[in-house]
Amino acid sequence: MTGTFYVVGVGPGDPELMTIKAARILDQSAAWLTPSASKDGISTAFTIASGAVRADGKEILTHHFPMKKIYRGEPADLEVQEAWDDATSWILSHLEQGHDVALPTLGDPAIYCTGFYVAETLLARSPMANIEIIPGISAIGATAAAAKTPLCLGDDELVVIPAVFENSKIREVLSQFNAVVFMKVFKSMDRLVPLLEELGLLDTSVLVERTSMADERVHHDLKALVGKELHYFSTLIVRKN
């Protein structure tokens, strides 16, 4: 009997925002594959998960996944692909022994999640592998809650995009939709603020750093962020209304 690979959404940061199911799956899994954005770095997903579930007695591998751009339909960067392949080999070695493996991931797995790339790589190697996705509270929803603003109401149209898009694409999106959520904005605010000001959208925009975590910060004055270093976990909401 083979084990199951779980991609588990652990929420945006506060362990109390983990779902009951996420906690149960993590508790019952013999091994955790915890992703890290830097070599020899601490896994934020592990910190969240271990804040709600005891990790004692589990086999835990903190695995570095390089933070490089991925374009769907095109081959991934070699370093990125190697990270997926190495993670898959480790997962398979446990599944074949009948052990469940959980990959805790920030927010919700459906939104820009490394876990899905690992799952795809696993299925390419072992098409009959058991895989389950456990949804979690997204940083998008938690950011709106922290800012005390809705994402969309009535006939609003909502779109979610990475802030690394070029200005022409961002301008097009802002002109077409009532509400836009920008992910990965920590290096893009110097470029986004002038564009939002030009479009008259600064007063209806809000940025939240480290949503739901102990040092969460809500920013309404986006001009004050120009030239400042923001945390990687920063999300921007822009609403026309």
Image: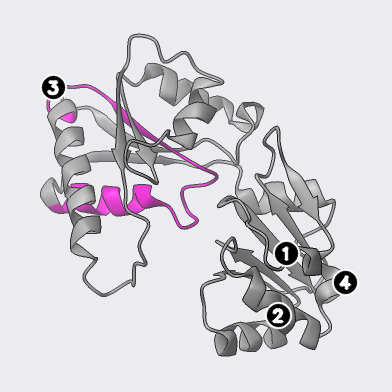
Q: Which residue is mark 3?
A: 97
Q: Mark 2 or mark 1, which is nearer to you?
A: 1
Report crowding for label 2: few under 14, some 14 to 19, many 20 or more residues within 10 A (C-alpha): some
| Residue identifier under label 4 | 203
Earlier in the chain: of badge 2 and badge 1, it is 2
Of circles 1 and 4, the one toward us is 4
Residue at which label 1 appears: 237
Q: Nearer the viewer, mark 3 or mark 4?
A: 4
Q: Are marks 3 and 4 in contact (CB under 8 Å)?
A: no
Magenta-drawn stretch contains 198: no
Q: Residue at x 84, y 83 (%)?
A: 200
Q: Which amino acid lies under the numbered mark 4 shown in the image of this protein?
A: Asp
Dot 4: element: helix
Mark 2 highlights which residue?
Answer: 177
| Nearest-to-viewer mark from 2 and 4 | 4
Helix, strand or loop under label 1: strand
Residue span colored magenta: 95-124
Q: Is residue 240 above or below residue 48?
A: below
Where's the N terminus, which quadrant? top left
Identify residue type, mark 2.
Answer: Phe
| Residue type at tag 1 | Ile
